[in-house]
Image (tube, rainbow, N blue to C red):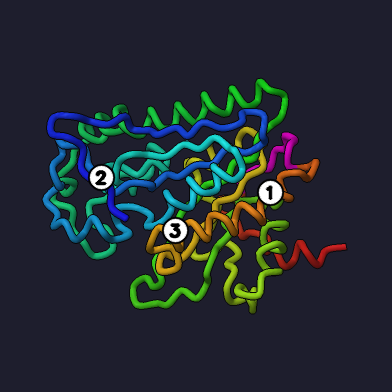
């Protein structure tokens, strides 16, 4: 589901905002929605085929996000530029903010990038997205109902030759308010059985990532949050991605009505420390 290039000489705004109910208790984010580059950057020296891969964007994530936003009447924010330009989910000092090599592909336009160019891309693309998240959250908090923050991503079926069996992963730091009930709701679905094999608990990545969008905009504000990863071969076309959007919205809707979701509770990040497992929390008295 690649995005068409904009007309020559134009540069789209770095953020697409989907309008929704600011008092509805949910903000959706899609950090890696697009595989497009602004015209001034050309193709960064890459073959076009590289832009169809996960290194350029999260395949299917935009359609999943749009579907969930429509069903849940939730505001959503999505980037309009490829993560190959700059990664809006990374902290501004993260060494992977601008990737010089991504999953075996050398990015010529990034290989010799200097500090000034990184700062330029940060100011033009990364910062406007982060600022829009803050402004939207401020507006939502002003309604009197703290929103949950849900970030939608997708992951490759294998990485570096290692198969990833999960159909969906729930990434969380130290706040289990969304991840735990979502895991239970997804586990009730026959197509996701056995749940231990098909629902990833901080898989395929750990949710404690300092400086990422969830950390900065949700964890540090005390907002309930989760990052949802869907395997890309399950959402590789619009119909499949829409189906997953419906599924996730249906599971998420009752969770959002829980009183603890709409409250501010601070959980210090466990970045650099071992995390708890959802199964252990579920078994706790």
Q: Is residue 179 above or below residue 75?
A: below
Measuring from the top left, give residue 99's x and y in whole percent.
Answer: 27, 50
Measuring from the top left, give residue 170's x and y in whole percent.
Answer: 58, 59
Q: CA distance from mark 1 to mark 3?
A: 21 Å
* Residue 54, image quadrant: bottom left
Query: What secondary structure is the magenta-colored segment mainly?
Result: loop
Which residue of the protein is positioned furthest toward the front in this rendering?
239
Question: Measuring 38% from the left and 62% from the top, which residue is drawn there?
Answer: 237
Q: Earlier in the sequence, mark 1 or mark 2?
A: 2
Q: Is residue 221 left or right of residue 215?
A: right
Residue identified by numbered label 1: 253
Q: Is residue 264 above or below residue 192?
A: above
Q: Nearer the viewer, residue 207 or 244?
A: 244
Question: Measuring 46% from the left and 53% from the top, which residue is drawn there?
Answer: 153
Residue identified by numbered label 3: 154
Tell me which segment is drawn in magenta: 261-269
Residue identified by numbered label 2: 36
Question: Measuring 50% from the left and 76% from the top, which residue is drawn there?
Answer: 165
In the rendered image, residue 267 lying in the magenta stretch gets the answer yes
In the rendered image, residue 14 lying in the magenta stretch gets the answer no
Q: CA distance from mark 3 to mark 2?
A: 17 Å
Residue mark closest to the camera, 1 vs 3: 1
Q: Is residue 235 left or right of residue 199?
A: left
Secondary structure state at the residue bearing disc 2 = loop
Q: Is residue 135 above or below residue 148?
A: above
Asked if the residue at tag 2 contacts the one at tag 3, i.e. Cβ–Cβ closer than 8 Å, the answer is no
């Amino acid at each position: 589901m690649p995005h068409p290039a904009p007309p020559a000489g134009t540069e789209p705004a770095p953020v697409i905002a989907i309008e929704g109910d600011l008092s509805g208790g949910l903000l959706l984010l899609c950090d890696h929605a697009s595989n497009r580059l602004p015209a001034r950057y050309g193709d960064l020296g890459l073959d076009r085929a590289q832009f169809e891969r996960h290194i350029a964007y999260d395949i299917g994530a935009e359609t999943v996000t749009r579907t969930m936003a429509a069903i849940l009447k939730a505001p959503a924010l999505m980037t309009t530029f490829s993560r190959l330009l700059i990664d809006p989910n990374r902290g501004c000092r993260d060494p992977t903010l601008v990737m010089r090599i991504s999953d075996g592909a050398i990015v010529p336009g990034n290989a010799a990038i200097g500090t000034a160019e990184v700062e330029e891309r940060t100011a033009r693309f990364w910062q406007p997205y982060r600022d829009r998240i803050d402004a939207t959250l401020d507006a939502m908090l002003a309604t009197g109902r703290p929103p949950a923050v849900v970030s939608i991503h997708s992951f490759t079926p294998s990485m570096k030759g290692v198969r990833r069996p999960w159909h969906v992963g729930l990434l969380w730091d130290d706040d289990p308010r969304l991840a735990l009930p979502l895991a239970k709701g997804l586990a009730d679905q026959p197509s996701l059985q056995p749940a231990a094999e098909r629902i990833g608990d901080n898989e395929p990545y750990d949710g404690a990532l300092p400086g990422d969008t969830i950390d900065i905009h949700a964890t540090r504000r005390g907002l309930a949050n989760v990052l949802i990863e869907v395997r890309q071969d399950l959402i590789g076309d619009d119909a499949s991605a829409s189906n997953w959007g419906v599924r996730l919205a249906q599971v998420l809707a009752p969770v959002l009505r829980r009183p603890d979701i709409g409250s501010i509770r601070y959980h210090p990040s466990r970045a650099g420390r071992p995390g708890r497992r959802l199964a252990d929390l579920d078994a706790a008295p």
